[in-house]
Image (cartoon, helix red, strand yellow):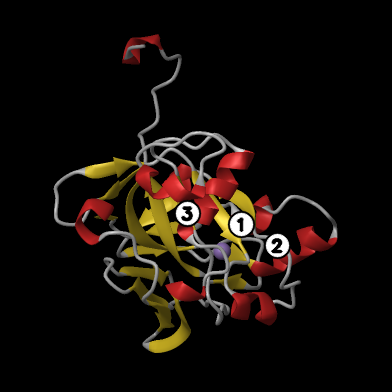
Amino acid sequence: MTADSFVIPAHTLPALPVAGTSKTFPVRRIWCVGRNYLEHIRELGNDERQPPFFFAKHADMIVHDGATIPYPGLTQNFQHEVEMIVALKSGGANLDAGKALDHVYGYGVSIDLTRRDLQMASRKKEQPWEIGKSFDNCAPCGALRAASEIGHPAKGKIWLSVNGTERQKGDLSEMIWNVPEIIAKLSLQVTLGAGDIIMTGTPAGVAALSPGDKIECGVDGLPSLRLAIAA
Ligand code: MN
């Protein structure tokens, strides 16, 4: 297929920078894990014994480190969820957890931005979550670091602050399902492939954002991520 064969101009491939290189990681799909840290399950009043589940955001909803985004429409309760992302260089279906890390290119920091009021309302009505989870600019992502350089982080601090005050704090070791288990589980639902990234769930401390807020977040050993909400 050439550019001439499209009836409208082809869109740009979303991509994440890779720290320490001039290259980028092309993003195919964004998968997200719900309820993967016990304290966050408790703060939302959910069942601790339920297995995690997956939802998706679109790759063109990514915004990069240092971005300023508008406060989104339709919501009165726009919340932050800091999460580590896993970026896949390969994939497959029904993957074995014992070999799942072979498919990982690298790791980064992201925010699963959420219109909490709309998410809760759709949950109550047994409707899909898109209105609360999948909207313009809902997937800020920082630069990746390659697993070939840093290995596979399984512990270390994950945190988020708003206007200099720490709001979220946890440790990767507190994940209920670890990264290999997440990859294996998700590969039962869809065939994973190169370019897929997975947001691995958020620790406790999720809270509302306001216009003018400045957010900073990170995971030990990964490039930090900054985001501002337009005043
Ligand atoms: Mn989340």
Q: Secondary structure at mark 3?
A: helix
Q: Residue at x 32, y 12 (%)?
A: 2
Left or right: 10 in relation to 151:
right
Disc 3 residue type? Pro
Task: Give the residue number, with chain letter if any, for mark 3.
Answer: 180
User: What is the crowding at mark 1: few (fewer than 14 residues within 10 Å), some, or many (at least 20)?
Assistant: many
Compared to residue 65, the image places residue 80 above or below, namely: below
Compared to residue 171, the image places residue 225 above or below, namely: above
Q: Is residue 163 visible?
A: yes
Q: How far, Cα to Cα, is label 2 from label 1?
A: 7 Å
Is the residue indicated by label 1 positioned so its CB lies within 8 Å of ligand 1? yes
User: What is the crowding at mark 2: few (fewer than 14 residues within 10 Å), some, or many (at least 20)?
Assistant: many
Q: How far, Cα to Cα, is label 3 from label 2?
A: 27 Å
Q: Nearer the viewer, residue 101 or 168?
A: 101
Q: Which mark is residue 119?
A: 2
Q: Which mark is residue 210?
A: none
Q: Residue at x 37, y 68 (%)?
A: 227
Q: Nearer the viewer, residue 173 or 69?
A: 173
Disc 1 residue type? Lys
Q: Secondary structure at mark 1?
A: helix
Mark 1 and mark 3 lie on one chain; the one further toward the N terminus is 1
Q: Position of residue 192 (x, y in %)?
A: 50, 37
- Tag 2–tag 1 contact (CB < 8 Å): yes
Q: Position of residue 190 (x, y in %)?
A: 59, 37
For the view shown, which residue lies furthest in the right direction? 125
Disc 2 residue type? Gln
Q: Residue at x 26, y 66 (%)?
A: 223
Q: Which mark is residue 133?
A: 1
Is the residue indicated by label 3 positioned so its CB lies within 8 Å of ligand 1? no
Left or right: 110 in relation to 145:
right
Q: Nearer the viewer, residue 188 or 80?
A: 188
User: What is the crowding at mark 3: few (fewer than 14 residues within 10 Å), some, or many (at least 20)?
Assistant: many
